[in-house]
Amino acid sequence: MFKTFSAKLAGAQAIVFFALGVGFILATERMFEGRRLLELATDLGIGVVVFSLLAALLVFNFLTRRIRALAVAVDRFRDSGFTQPIRLTSANPTGDDIDRLGAAVQEMSERIAEQLGLLEQTDVRRRELLANVSHDLRTPLASMQGYLETLLLKHGTLPPEEERSYLEVAAKHSERLARLIRDLFQLTKLEAHELKPQCESFPIAELVQDVVEKFQLAADKRGLRLSSELTGQHAQLHADIGMIESVLENLIENAMRHTSAGGVIRVEVVPLEEARVALRVIDTGRGIPSDELPTIFDRYYRVNRGEASDAGSTGLGLAITRHIIDLHGGKIRVESVLGKGTTFSIELPLDADSTVTPSAGAALP
Ligand SMILES: Nc1ncnc2c1ncn2[C@@H]1O[C@H](COP(=O)(O)OP(=O)(O)OP(=O)(O)O)[C@@H](O)[C@H]1O
Ligand SMILES: [Mg+2]
């Protein structure tokens, strides 16, 4: 009945006035009986004042109880460093003004605590990234510096073959440094949505074949069997050819790096329903532990940091890959069994003009 705060106040006032009125009528009756006008008027005056004061105090106390509880909760929220959101028993978004105010403050406190948590997480990740980047930049830089200083110190005294090998090592480290900086630059631009794909139509099977051929020699040298299986010969993508090529390169490079001699790496192109195509890179390598799979696409993530950084990897490849696939409206997924092998599957939309027959039951879930 008394929905709003002002209605409650009006109700309380009406009760007080009603009580005063009853008191006045009773007093007036007695006054006419006993003719004690002055005495009664004084008594009545004092009574009315005392009663009004007490009633006002009670009403005020009753009505401000929830506001005081809210103030205490806000103080507690501030004391917790804005991390523990307010919990009010009277917060009711469909109640009176004070209930709604409580509900709004409670919701605001939840949002503030959530945003603060996110900010903290971002800050931790930023610091981790900075530490990782500094470490990875410092390592090749320090090696390069060491070799170049030795060359300068021993200039003219070193046999030519030794001098050349020092120069080769320094060049290898500078190459690694350049790659790391290039990848970081690309990832930062992708994350900031500053890199726009230069899309064109091309047959995906041809690109896969070219990339596989590029790695064939290296695979042979390492005793790996690298092959491609191309079912969608006419499947056309409308995509940035350079970006898709770098995605394939990273996945094949990863597969080769983590598969030992005698292992098999297969790259598949399979047309799917709804004008989409699947690209798969399947290896029989060492696999990825299941608890590490959810973090595999995070930037700077490596299953074994020390080992991978020696092998010349930057740990940014899959993060870049995922951003590129997102940018093209696709999906990427990984399945892996430790000690048995890993499959990376990518699903991409085909060019609108591309007509291919889909292979049954090949879509990503
Ligand atoms: N096919 C695979 N088999 C086993 N582990 C893999 C495979 N692919 C990726 N990984 C694991 O995931 C990590 C992240 O891969 P990612 O491509 O992002 O980085 P990287 O290969 O270490 O460095 P980069 O690609 O920048 O040179 C790798 O370090 C490796 O530990
Ligand atoms: Mg990689």
Image (spheres, rainbow, N blue to C red):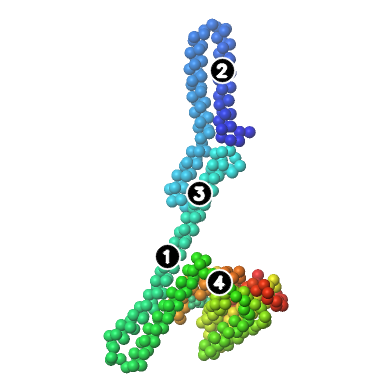
Per the image, the residue denoted by label 2 is 23
Amino acid under disc 3: Ser
Per the image, the residue denoted by label 3 is 109
Callout 1 touching callout 4 (CB < 8 Å)? no
Callout 1 touching callout 2 (CB < 8 Å)? no
Residue 22 % position (x, y): 58, 18
Of 179 and 18, the residue lying toward us: 179
Distance of label 1 from label 4 (alpha carbons): 30 Å
Looking at the rendered structure, the secondary structure element under dot 2 is helix
- Quarter of the image with the C terminus is bottom right
Distance of label 4 from label 3 (alpha carbons): 41 Å
N-terminal-most mark, 1 or 2 = 2
Q: Which mark is residue 309?
A: none
N-terminal-most mark, 1 or 3 = 3
| Label 3 lies in ligand 1 vicinity (Cβ under 8 Å) | no
Residue 234 % position (x, y): 67, 80
Per the image, the residue denoted by label 4 is 197
Residue 231 % position (x, y): 67, 82
- Of the residues tagged 2 and 3, which is closer to the observer? 3
Looking at the rendered structure, the secondary structure element under dot 4 is loop
Of 294 and 359, the residue lying toward us: 359
Per the image, the residue denoted by label 1 is 127
Residue at screen point 54% across, 77% down: 242
Specify the quadrant of the image occupied by residue 33: top right
